[in-house]
Amino acid sequence: MKRINIGILGLGTVGAGSAKVLQDNQAEIQRRLGCEVVVTAASVRDLNADRDCDCSSIDMLTDPFAVIERDDVDIVVELIGGDSLAKELVMQAMSNGKHVVTANKALVAMHGDELFAHAQAHQVAFCFEAAVAGGISIIKALREGLAGNQIELIAGIINGTGNFILTEMRDKGRDFDDVLKEAQTLGYAEADPTFDVEGIDAAHKLTILAALGFGIPMAFDKLIIEGISDLELKDVDFAGELGYRIKHLGIAKATDAGLELRVHPTLIPSKRLIANVDGVMNAVLVKGNAVGNTLHYGAGAGALPTASAVVADICDVVRAMSLDVSQRVPYTGFQASQVVERAIKLPEQIECAFYLRFEVADVPGVMSKLSAEFAQREISIEAIKQTEPEPGQESVSVIFITQITTEASVNEVLSTLGALPEVSAPVVKLRVEHFH
Amino acid sequence: MKRINIGILGLGTVGAGSAKVLQDNQAEIQRRLGCEVVVTAASVRDLNADRDCDCSSIDMLTDPFAVIERDDVDIVVELIGGDSLAKELVMQAMSNGKHVVTANKALVAMHGDELFAHAQAHQVAFCFEAAVAGGISIIKALREGLAGNQIELIAGIINGTGNFILTEMRDKGRDFDDVLKEAQTLGYAEADPTFDVEGIDAAHKLTILAALGFGIPMAFDKLIIEGISDLELKDVDFAGELGYRIKHLGIAKATDAGLELRVHPTLIPSKRLIANVDGVMNAVLVKGNAVGNTLHYGAGAGALPTASAVVADICDVVRAMSLDVSQRVPYTGFQASQVVERAIKLPEQIECAFYLRFEVADVPGVMSKLSAEFAQREISIEAIKQTEPEPGQESVSVIFITQITTEASVNEVLSTLGALPEVSAPVVKLRVEHFH
């Protein structure tokens, strides 16, 4: 039986998980591929660390460059992370004629175009299913399963840490900071949670999804990115009372006026399936002009779910190798010559519905002043909610949910209304998507 | 630019939809594939019927055999349905060296093994993404996206008609017969609804999913199949009160004692995502030993969603043709030599939890008699519910939800308890799955 050799760069959580899946599922993988897939070498920082896989037949090296030079490595699996050393290794591995599989979203989002060209030049596969939404095979769905469609919308819960925090806030009425500390204790969140809670991680993933959905170059720098660290519990609660749940979404939407690429907390009607994706789970909604709405749900992180995607990529490469083919589907799903820039909207050009919370003095006439301003700007209102004043407090919360309008119009309303003497705190502005 | 020619057998709803998607999305499909895909010929029963696609450049023929003989047809798309004429056409098309794409679940479920061997012998592609769950790319997910896993469970809402009926029963408190009539008026259900409501259609699809999940031959004849036509509204309501929803599921489960392959109405905890898949939508839950639970959701029927899957298959074939490859992934996802029989459980060997409703005389001691029998058979009870007697009625409903046990044990209990003089009607037995 033919044998394909794997070299893994980085035998941490996902690396050891990938080795374990290849070992545990060896028989089933052979039934599928008709050849043996074996991890021959791996690079690690600490040779003596405990690992969740059998390392007895793996050559353990401390120098990752030694792995990519070996003749007995056909496919390099890059699981080091970051976009500096990882990039150097991946480029060199390709130059050496190795196929590359990676779970590194920052690498692909920041350097994807260059890596694709390099892979193409060296006629090697470059696969990154594990870079977005862990075990969910969303890369394959976009490049292949939905290839007959013009993609109209991609909207994903693509950061498990953020979704865990939002779920706990809603279900248990806990503050953001409180839940974040627990997430750090549980290992769901890093000591520095910036990447997760400020939306950078989600933005890396959305950059990749948008490139594959629309056939555009990586556009990380053009994304609108808002985190969830400023989200107040009271807005989670008010949203619930109005029939919505707040999720931290990455949204890529095609409109006649250009693409919208944005990461921000978003109100979604509670009835939508994606609004019911809780805890650390991920889900990606894809709307195509033929298929309509589809939802792709699964574990977005963790050793074995991410390994599931890494090994799926390995299987894809091995199946192509068996047919003497390198990359079977173009890296973005579009022919390289057809990957073209499209206009990307500026923040004020975004069109959606809005949730706006005003803290106002509990005096007559305030509601009419607020409403009049919306009417004057021709912004229709979908729903209004006003709280009762709490004992000892002089202000009440007034929430407007608008119909679809532009962010520019809403900003104009807010600049006027925010200056009213009756408005006692900065207005909270959140976006609302209905996903019909 | 290279041109690939398509011949469509049957230009009805899905056929015209597929032609329309190829036409409307021609530019985007060319960006993806780097070649032109054109429908050159189609067979129809009535040359003069109105169709939802532009037929001006399609050679319209009444003889389907004429289509598969043409030199200007590279890929034959079979959308005639049924497993007699369709089989003859598909076999002949393959013999002629044509790649074949079909949406025909009965054909694949009943004759898949023979068709795969024939396709293999003639080195042509045979694709059937559209045969299961319409626009959801579940075939690709099983064969490729989850290829690193040992599949433990597949559970799907794979008949939209049945799901529409169950959703209406639950949401609007309507009887089965009443909703079925509306479904027929709306065009969701056929004049003869047997295939949909008795589970035959779902069983065809489950047969295919099981073959792909486990690498087994088509096993339609070994499936346990129960429909929803006997389902009473009161059980839908009681299930709801106990925290469950009833869905008509196709379930394929791997256990140490063999495979369970079964289609039946199933109680699922209301909190599960799949329990919230409503109306005509489909969803397939797949659990792999690495990835855990995944859910694949979308439209399971309709012209354009089904066409989305047909065109995805066409794209797959064209991409392979560009590389001078025929079938890239084995037809079941497993090497032909590795497709092997596995033990399939008989009905009484099934293990799951059960919902059992007894109609009993409202006299003292009945509950204790019922409970004692369960205890004696060592069946643990998860929940019990007893209704108040309604005015003028002498019987009450008593519902037991058991913990996991075998169907044989439950049947023994029921044969004893069903004979009690206090039990006034046949006991209702439904299965319960928790999908942890």
Image (tube, coloured by chain):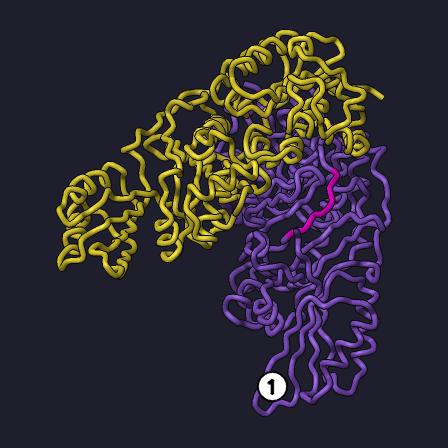
Chain colours: A yellow, B purple
Q: Is residue A326 visible?
A: no
Q: Which amino acid is tagged 1?
A: Pro
Of residue A329 and residue A92, the one placed in the foreground of this image is A92
**Helix, strand or loop status at disc 1:** loop
Q: Is residue A198 above or below residue A67?
A: below
Of residue B64 and residue A74, the one placed in the foreground of this image is A74
The picture places residue A104, in percent across and down from the top left corner, at 56, 23
Q: Chain of mark 1?
A: B
The answer to which quarter of the image holds residue A153 is: top left
Does A192 sit left or right of A134 as displayed? left
The picture places residue B6, in percent across and down from the top left corner, at 61, 32
Farthest residue in the front direction?
A: A392
Quarter of the image where the N terminus of chain A is located: top right
The range drawn in magenta is B150-156
Does A32 sit left or right of B393 as displayed? right
The residue singled out by tag 1 in the image is: B389
Disc 1 crowd, CA 10 A, few/some/many (<14, 14-19, 20+): few
A309 inside magenta stretch: no
Q: Residue at x 44, y 39 (%)?
A: A249
Does B167 sit left or right of B112 as displayed? left
Q: Is residue A347 visible?
A: yes
Q: Main secondary structure of the magenta part?
A: strand
